[in-house]
């Protein structure tokens, strides 16, 4: 370890009180030049709040903040930015309809005789982008690029305005492996140039790959600051959740549970496809079965989920539910037939910020029953209480406005909404994204428990460990095609990764059920 570098940000005794919740209580935090410092903690621990205190989104009730040795309390994020503190959120906050170059240079356009010299401005943008290894047309519209590229553009923009501190709050949760690598190489490069980087992620692998130092928060209080080398994974998790995470093992039983595949499947998709989105796919899901969908981002996982759920209209193929044909392309009809769908896009399709936790949960039941059949207050309360407890929603207050919950807790409420509809088949697209390790285990356990009682599940996750732990079978997609199926008890992580990458697993010749080998041939 290099000797102590100079502190760029020194926060001490930070306290922030929201009505009914002390989000931060006397927290100290120091960020040094040239380090990647990860802020760790469970959902609701106070990570985003601490960041917002630094960047001027929230005022503090007590404590002090020094940036580059000077006492500062920014009033707005623009103030913070002007002082060299830039933030890149998970949801990119740039102008979607402007070009890449305009976004990078916004407010710093190159002028000649008072007029913007666009040629020079785009050239400068291209130079900044190239410095971070991003080679794209600066005259292309931002919205035409992937989230990953947009994030890199946001970071480049931060570099134009001489940034000393770069804050990244869960920037990787919707990136694939390759994109994370690209982002990390940019982060390392900036760190080596002396930028102080504050990073938040719930992916422990990423934390150990990129961090120099960690600060752990629990329940709004400081647990401690550690060099990454002094804290092993299990110790870190124990510090975050305040107990050992031992119970995870019991879940492996879920993958081992035998499934009766002789009768009529709960869901059968035959030749289901959509032009430019998904080649025709066959898929069967039986009663009580959890089928994982694995593949890289863009492999067609989400497309398949959306076709199954009626969210998109297929242009070929059919879906049978319980042995009878189901209308495709209608989410309403799918829900009537007992198919619930929890989308990966919680902001666009998920939570309703101005409603309470309870209201957000019962929305799904209401949709399933139709507007005519009211749900009794007692029934509502029972369902709401059950899921707040089962998924560990915090604060455990049914009347809290959902927009005031932390990101991970909003995700739990969304999941509760669809579990509460008591569907026959539940399609979960990235249900544990942004969820902390402890809560992830709670969610996996709840899903496994419901499946044991007969619920069928289609489970999408970028975290393959999770798929292998919970699902009995995995359908693997690549380049918008299903390339095969594996029984999870026959494969380990390496074999699955190899299969996804190369379409074959050496370790385990896929022992697929008969129904599956036939559709493998059809596709091949
Ligand atoms: N505007 C607000 N009004 C009321 N309570 C809030 C507000 N913002 C945050 N909170 C509460 O403060 C606490 C800390 O939330 P914060 O968003 O900082 O958590 P986090 O550590 O970022 O969690 P996650 O990993 O889920 O993103 C939570 O209990 C949250 O409900
Ligand atoms: Mg957060």
Image (cartoon, rainbow, N blue to C red):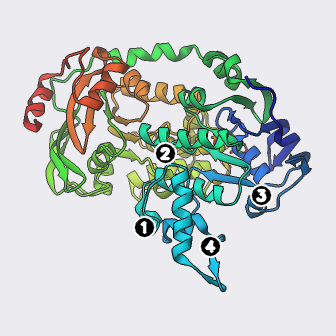
Between the residue at mark 2 and the residue at mark 3, the CA separation in whole angstroms equals 38 Å
Q: Residue 80 carries which label?
A: 3
In front: label 1 or label 4: 4
Q: Name the residue under label 2.
A: 417
Between the residue at mark 2 and the residue at mark 1, the CA separation in whole angstroms equals 39 Å
In the picture, measured across the screen, residue 464 lies left or right of residue 356, that is left
Asked if marks 2 and 3 touch (Cβ < 8 Å), the reply is no
Q: Is mark 1 on a helix, strand or loop?
A: loop
Q: Where is residue 48 in the image (x, y as percent from the top left)?
A: 69, 45
Between the residue at mark 4 and the residue at mark 3, the CA separation in whole angstroms equals 20 Å
In front: label 2 or label 1: 1
Between the residue at mark 3 and the residue at mark 1, the CA separation in whole angstroms equals 29 Å
Relative depth, front residue between 478 and 49: 478
Query: Where's the C terminus, which quadrant?
Result: top left
Q: Does the residue labelled 1 lie within 8 Å of ligand 2?
A: no
Q: Name the residue under label 1.
A: 140
Q: Position of residue 498 (x, y in %)?
A: 30, 25
């Amino acid at each position: 370890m290099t000797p102590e570098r100079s502190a760029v940000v020194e926060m001490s005794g930070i306290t922030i009180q929201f009505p009914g919740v002390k989000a931060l209580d006397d927290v100290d935090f120091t960020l040094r030049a040239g380090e990647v410092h990860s802020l760790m903690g469970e959902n609701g621990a106070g990570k985003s709040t601490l960041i917002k205190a630094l960047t001027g989104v929230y005022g503090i009730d007590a404590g002090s903040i020094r940036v580059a040795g000077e006492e500062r309390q920014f009033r707005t994020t623009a103030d913070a930015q002007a002082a060299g503190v830039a933030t890149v959120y998970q949801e990119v906050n740039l102008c979607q309809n402007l070009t890449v170059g305009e976004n990078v240079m916004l407010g710093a356009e190159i002028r000649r005789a008072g007029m913007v010299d666009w040629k020079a401005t785009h050239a400068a943008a291209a130079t900044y982008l190239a410095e971070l290894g991003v080679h794209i047309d600066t005259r292309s519209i931002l919205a035409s690029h992937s989230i990953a590229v947009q994030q890199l553009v946001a970071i480049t923009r931060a570099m134009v305005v001489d940034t000393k501190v770069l804050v990244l709050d869960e920037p990787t949760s919707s990136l694939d492996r390759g994109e994370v690598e690209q982002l990390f190489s940019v982060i390392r490069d900036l760190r080596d140039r002396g930028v102080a980087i504050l990073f938040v992620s719930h992916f422990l692998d990423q934390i150990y790959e990129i961090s120099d130092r960690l600060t752990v928060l629990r329940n709004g209080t400081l647990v401690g600051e550690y060099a990454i080398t002094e804290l092993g994974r299990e110790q870190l998790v124990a510090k975050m959740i305040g107990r050992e995470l031992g119970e995870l093992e019991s879940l492996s039983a879920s993958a081992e549970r035998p499934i009766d595949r002789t009768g009529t499947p709960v869901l059968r998709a035959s030749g289901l496809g959509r032009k430019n989105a998904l080649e025709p796919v066959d898929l069967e899901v039986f009663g009580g079965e959890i089928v994982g969908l694995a593949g890289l981002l863009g492999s067609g996982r989400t497309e398949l989920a959306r076709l199954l759920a009626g969210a998109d209209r297929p242009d070929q193929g059919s879906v049978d539910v319980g042995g009878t044909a189901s209308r495709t392309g209608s989410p309403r009809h799918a829900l009537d037939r007992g198919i619930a769908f929890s989308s990966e896009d919680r902001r666009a399709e998920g939570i309703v910020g101005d409603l309470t936790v309870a209201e957000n949960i019962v929305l799904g039941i209401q949709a399933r029953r139709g507007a005519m059949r009211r749900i009794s207050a007692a029934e509502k309360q029972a369902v709401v209480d059950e899921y707040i407890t089962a998924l560990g929603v915090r604060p455990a207050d049914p009347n809290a406005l959902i927009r005031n919950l932390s990101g991970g807790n909003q995700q739990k409420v969304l999941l509760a909404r669809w579990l509460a509809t008591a569907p026959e088949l539940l399609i979960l697209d990235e249900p544990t994204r942004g969820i902390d390790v402890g809560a992830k285990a709670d969610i996996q356990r709840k899903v496994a428990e419901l499946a044991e009682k007969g619920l069928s599940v289609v489970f999408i996750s970028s975290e393959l460990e999770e798929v292998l732990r919970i699902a009995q079978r995995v359908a693997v997609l690549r380049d918008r095609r299903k390339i095969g199926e594996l029984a999870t008890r026959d494969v380990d992580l390496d074999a699955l990764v190899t299969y996804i990458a190369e379409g074959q697993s050496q370790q385990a010749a896929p022992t697929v059920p008969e129904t599956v080998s036939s559709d493998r041939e059809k596709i091949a």
